[in-house]
Image (spheres, rainbow, N blue to C red):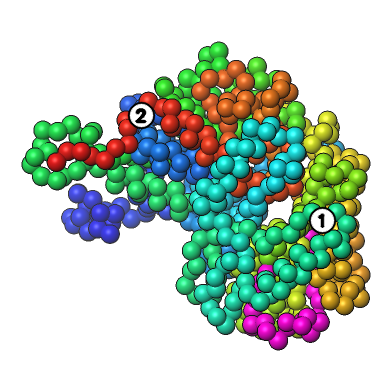
Amino acid sequence: MGKYSASKNFNHGYPTPGPQSPTSQDVMDHVFFASKTEWKDIRENQEFDFIVIGTGFCSLAFIDKTLENNPHAKILVLERGPFFLPEHFQNLPLPYRDTLGGMSETFPWSLTKETNDGEFIKWQAGMVPFFGGRSTLWSGWCPRPTRQEMINWPKSLIDTAEKYFTSAEKLLNVVNADEIESTNQKKPIYGTLQKELQDLLIKNTKKVSGLTRVIPAPLAVKEPMIGDIDFAKFSTPGKLLELLDKQLELSRTFQDGQDHINCDSKKLKKGNKLQMVTNCNVEKIINEKGHAIALKTSRGIVNIGNAKVILAMGTLPPTTLLHNSFSELKTIGKRFTSHFISSIYARVPMEDYKFSKELAELELGAFYVAGVDKERDHKGQFHIQLTALSDKNPEKNTKTALMNMPDVVATASSDQLKSSEDYIVFVCASLGEIDFNNSKNYFVKNEDEDITANSTLQVIANENDNKVWDAMDASTFETLEHILSPKGKQAVEYWDANTNSWSKKRPKKENRRAPLLVHEASTLCITNDDAGVVNLDYRPKGVNNVYVTGAGLWPTGASWNPTLTMVALSQHLADNLSKKANILPSKKNTLT
């Protein structure tokens, strides 16, 4: 504690009180991130093996795997924004739910008028411009896509993803909902309700046309927390800071005794310090004939030297960066895909279920239900992120229920829960992929003066989109009415957003279809042919030392949640680069 609250010349109030107005960013920079003095030294004197842009999932995956292979790797991490949340917002006190959206989201692109005027699709979910990025504001669903679902993907890329799924799940701590252990036996959050509804869904999948598989929700979680929260959602800030702290310890020279006094201090180190810089927006990659030589940032020029640059900053920001840096990449942003969403809330009387008397006071269940529009088969994929909730005492348990709900796209409201103590409430966030062959969709460069936001996004729903969306909504209603309701359609009630009450009528399209898209992809498509932007070694075509991670690589986005696959391929990239790099070998100190 003392080393952070005082300095040599201002020692705990002697001879004067010393500085009195530190900001939260000052504290974080002092403990974790590069100070202004350290940033000057980084730019002027230090050399790196890798420069990683971004601090989200792909960044963590690449850094973690690289340092696992060799802790002597010298890595510089550049983050666009400041430190905001220490972990996922749902792990924090309930008022933090208001941090979702609003000022915590930016849109570094311009929408076309045709997009803005769309009937249902009107905008793309934005970026989270803070340390940890979208990982602090996400739903945690991490399904493994099947080979059949990875439509139009190069076989070698599918093989690679499957090879790394297990290690990606380990890093994200992915646990199936039916295996999440409760911290409070009076509130087994994933207990009887999870088991019984899971059996019901799996046994009756064929009752609904188009459904292809049902699995317990694979969720990225932390270790159980003390108190009422039975699982805490995964985010990257804590993991990244742990890596930083670990590398700092490894970088310190041993002090084992006088026998080492004449030894080379570099040989006595077990690793190199991990350098992180916040409030540093990378604006352009300066290059010569496809070889990156420097980064133009909001905090000055960074010399790349012999480092490899890793773009781990989402899908659309790296697309803009490459647009502005490599004019020869003509196919950037010509393809765009994303997921449209329907949010449907329903309830069924608790007494209709044979197991109702076995339910605890509060229980949750979470299920991943995949399907296709039969007319388009796997070109028209969708899935339902299905959450079930039984709360016999909502006045007491609403806070706990809301903090444990796995989905942030569709979450039961306090009004819905407080009027449903005798019901099982179902929350369906249904996601489908827009047509990846729609030539009217694009993400291209414009003439905006802000070089970090000079891109135009257009997304226009076509006939294929409407067919898949209709099929997805129909399957969601049929799943609720023909599988999950023991007494069928007549026992199901739906939430009416217009009257703020429950109704026997299915909600209209305009009330269930969200105007936003999520899980953007394909702008930096990785393929075997000339239509792709990125080669199978993750380098943009014709570029030597810049590598791309994330869903921008996806040939198609299908409907599955992308995080697990993003992490898997980022780990593969780290293995490819760190095992080939000329880095001081990672060996235990042999001096005695």
Which is nearer the eye, 109 or 188? 188
- For disc 2, the neighbor class at 10 Å (few under 14, some 14 to 19, many from 20) is some
In this picture, residue 174 sits left or right of residue 240: right
> Please, what is the three-letter code of the amino acid marked with disc 1?
Leu
Give, as a single range, the part of the protein colored magenta: 339-365
Q: Counting residues from the N terminus, which is met first, the one under dot 2 or under dot 1?
A: 1
Q: Is residue 368 visible?
A: yes
Of badges 2 and 1, nearer the viewer stands 1
Residue at numbered disc 1: 211
Residue at numbered disc 2: 583
Give the structural element (helix, strand or loop) at label 2.
loop
Q: Position of residue 1 (x, y in %)?
A: 28, 59
Residue at the image point whose x is 53% and y is 14% from the top? 288
Residue at the image point whose x is 52% and y is 34% from the top? 573
Give the structural element (helix, strand or loop) at label 1.
strand
Would residue 340 be counted in the magenta stretch?
A: yes
